[in-house]
Amino acid sequence: MHLAGAAKFGAATAHRLSGIAHNKVQEIDDAAPLDAKSLDALKGVAVLTKLANESSQIGVNLLAANKEMIKEANQAKGQNPAEFLREVAALLPN
């Protein structure tokens, strides 16, 4: 449960940092991407992107660890979707 919670917070952090990095990209001058101001923006984008990727690792690893379960769930034939969602919800942290 704690790892799932950490994954949730890590995913939220990765999402926010990725958004900030996306906005920072707008500061790069397309005509002069290697001038001092653009290089500072590029460095900021690189740092934010690296932090976002590192923040997402717990969630990504949990998804990878449960890949087979998800594959089986997606291939379930004839299962009532509402029942499937109840089963999944029972496994999620509060």
Image (cartoon, rainbow, N blue to C red):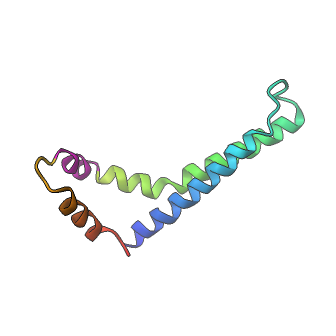
Q: Measuring from the top left, give residue 63's x and y in whole percent.
A: 36, 52
Of 45 and 22, which appears nearest the observer? 22
Of 24 and 46, which appears nearest the observer? 24
Of 71 and 86, which appears nearest the observer? 86
Judge left or right: residue 25 versus residue 65. right
Residue at x 21%, y 61% (from the top left corner): 82
Q: Is residue 68 magenta?
A: yes
Judge left or right: residue 1 versus residue 36. left
Judge left or right: residue 10 versus residue 39. left
Q: Find residue 3 and report its image quarter.
A: bottom left
Residue at x 83%, y 35% (from the top left corner): 38
Q: Measuring from the top left, give residue 66's x and y in whole percent.
A: 29, 54
Tell me the magenta residue range. Answer: 67-75
Q: Is residue 73 magenta?
A: yes
Residue at x 51%, y 65% (from the top left corner): 9
State whether residue 3 is above or below residue 61: below
State whether residue 81 is above or below residue 4: above
Number of on-image labels = 0
* Residue lying farthest to the top in this orientation: 31
State whether residue 91 is above or below residue 53: below
Judge left or right: residue 59 versus residue 64. right
| Image quarter of the C terminus | bottom left
* Residue lying farthest to the left in this orientation: 78
Give the dominant element type of the magenta stretch: helix, strand or loop: helix
Of 26 and 61, which appears nearest the observer? 26
Residue at x 18%, y 63% (from the top left corner): 83
* Residue lying farthest to the bottom in this orientation: 94
Q: Measuring from the top left, give residue 79's x and y in whole percent.
A: 13, 54
| Image quarter of the N terminus | bottom left
